[in-house]
Image (spheres, helix red, strand yellow):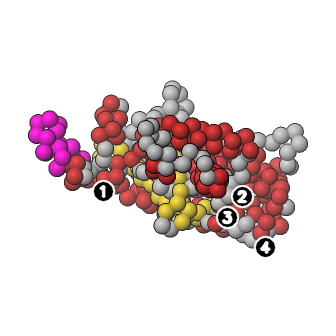
Amino acid sequence: MTRTQLTNEQWEFIEPYLPIGEYGPYPERLREQFEGVIWRFRSSAQWREMPSEFGPWPTVYGRFRVWRDAGVFSALLEGMIAEAARRGQTDLSLVSVDSTTARAHQDAAGMHLGKDVMDALEEAAAEQERARQKRGGPPGQNGQDGGDDPEQEERRRIRRRRKFRLNQALLGRSRGGLTSKIHLAADRRCRPLSLVLTAGQAGDSPQFVPVLQKIRVRLPVGRPRTRPGAVAADKAYSSRANRSYLRKRGIKAVIPEKKDQAANRKKKGHRGGRPTCHDSDLYKERNTVERLINKLKAWRGIATRYDKSPESYLAGLHLRASMIWINDLLKATG
């Protein structure tokens, strides 16, 4: 007998977001299946190892895919943030941005792609290769043989297909193996505001703006709040583009400047612009996003990625983030 995954108070927040179709499950079984999804991401076990208390594992997995494709988990996260805003428990005075790497298990590799998708991607890659070929050089220059060797061309095709699968699955190769990267924003109470999933080798700075653009705090009246008062981040996000984006939106940047950027600016003299400044006291609160990462990875299915499709893993991230908000709401009411 496994332990219960949800309390009655937690289920009251979740139940309104689960759709019940004409041929869907009974309401009492709906909670069992949702708890089965929580059990899977919390324990990181295989679906087929699910205890019988949650029902047949194919049924629970099928229900999870239906909820995932319907956007239930992302809607649940947005709903919990909106509920906190309705109670006046949201704080956008300071938002911290950071990223973390999730090691991908070997079971996460090998996502299936349809033949039409693979053919379209391969044709696009072939056009890019033809556009990159240098003109006027010998046929064998830079390894370009013009496709005369069928074996070499087949090896290239296999490598392209492997690369396509990794790109579509949002998996990247590093010295540690296959990885995915989670980019996120947190408020002052270590609660997630937005999540972005990329391949493991993706840089932090290019995802700074997409993470901030996903922040939406729905209010009971009026448009959603999307602009925090200040944004704290480490030196990896210290780029002119990021600072310009914050300046245009009237957001205070709490980002220290890199030494090489400062040296380059000073070398240019008055053409280098004004020196950047950041509030060192506010920067001390940037640890909230790092503490949030520890909360997310408390679920073993989040700390290590076992899902082949990025949609399934992102649904688990939204589920874990929603539970963090629900627990915080219950703590405030208690």
Amino acid bearing label 4:
Met
Which disc, if any, is residue 284?
Answer: 1
- Name, please, the residue furthest toward the right: 23
Instruction: Say left or right for 155 vs 179.
Output: right
> Judging from the image, what secondary structure is the residue with disc 4 in?
loop
> Judging from the image, what secondary structure is the residue with disc 1 in?
helix
Amino acid bearing label 3:
Asp
Q: Which residue is mark 2?
A: 37
* Of callouts 2 and 1, the N-terminal one: 2
Q: Are marks 3 and 2 in contact (CB under 8 Å)?
A: no
* CA distance separating discs 3 and 2: 18 Å
* CA distance separating discs 1 and 4: 45 Å
Q: Kindly report which numbered mark, 3 or 4, lies closer to the viewer in this rendering.
A: 3
* Of callouts 4 and 2, the N-terminal one: 4
Q: Kindly report which numbered mark, 3 or 2, lies closer to the viewer in this rendering.
A: 3
* Of callouts 3 and 4, the N-terminal one: 4
Magenta span contains residue 270: yes
Amino acid bearing label 2:
Val
Looking at the rendering, which quadrant does residue 273 occupy? top left
One can see residue 183 in this view: no
* Of callouts 3 and 1, the N-terminal one: 3
Q: Which residue is mark 4?
A: 1
Residue 56 is situated, as x and y percent measured from the top left of the image, at 85, 61
* CA distance separating discs 3 and 4: 27 Å
* Quadrant of the rendering where the C terminus is positioned: bottom right
Amino acid bearing label 1:
Lys
Q: Which residues are magenta?
A: 263-278
Q: Dot 4: within a 10 Å radius of its alpha carbon, few (fewer than 14), some, or many (20 or more) residues?
A: few
